Image (spheres, helix red, strand yellow):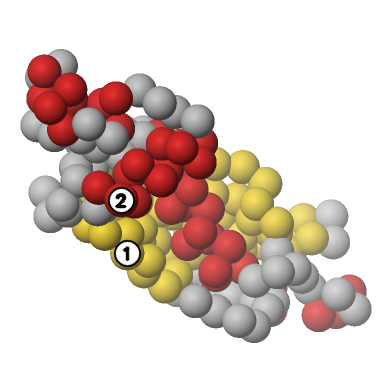
Amino acid sequence: MSTGQRYFEDVQPGEPIAEVSFPLTVYRLVMAAGGNRDFNSIHHNGDYARSTGAPDMYASTAFLLGTWERAVRDWIGPGGTIRSIKGFRMRQFNLVGDTTRVLGHVASAELRDGAGVVLLELRSENSKGVTVGPGQVEVTLPVRAAGL
């Protein structure tokens, strides 16, 4: 996890963002269900999830969006903002017992109306490959020249 502030001037297209890993334990899925108030049993009860045709209990969309936000916020620092998320698309289950990793890189960076706008390409992967995305997250970063 980054503790410093990233500035627009320091960003290069192609630059990777730091990978963030999330082991999907029963405890984590139960806590996520309680935290986001998604009490659908498919997210915290393996027997129930299997009765619906799923291989086992699996991470919810809200949890997985949170993993993307964590990876992005670690990269942008406290002075950055998230403007939009596009292409966040579920492709496979993120099952209990596996680890979901968020990976990405800088797709573009430009000054727009005085703001340092950066487009990040992200995806989630587990042991079976890409599970969410690929997608894009548009962020802003402070610009040193603007005194921010």
Residue 48 or residue 56, whichever sits in front: 48
Q: Residue 132 at x, y = what percent?
A: 31, 42
Answer left or right for 146 relative to 55. right
Residue 101 or residue 60, whichever sits in front: 60
Label 1 CA crowd tier, 10 Å (few <14, some 14–19, many 20+): some
Q: Give the residue displayed 70% in from the left and 69% down from the top.
A: 78
Answer left or right for 98 relative to 65. left
Which residue is disc 2 drawn over?
Answer: 27
Q: Residue 111 at x, y = what percent?
A: 74, 62
User: Is residue 74 in sight in this rendering?
Assistant: yes
Q: Give the answer, above or below, for where 71 lies relative to 67.
A: below
Mark 2 and mark 1 lie on one chain; the one further toward the N terminus is 1
Answer left or right for 29 relative to 86. left
- For badge 1, the amino acid type reads Ser
Q: Residue 148 at x, y = what percent?
A: 86, 75
Label 2 CA crowd tier, 10 Å (few <14, some 14–19, many 20+): few
- For badge 2, the amino acid type reads Tyr
Q: Give the residue displayed 18% in from the left and 25% down from the top.
A: 49
Q: Give the answer, above or below, for where 22 lies relative to 32.
A: below
Which of the labelled discs sits on residue 21, or is there none?
A: 1
- Marks 2 and 1, how far apart at CA: 16 Å
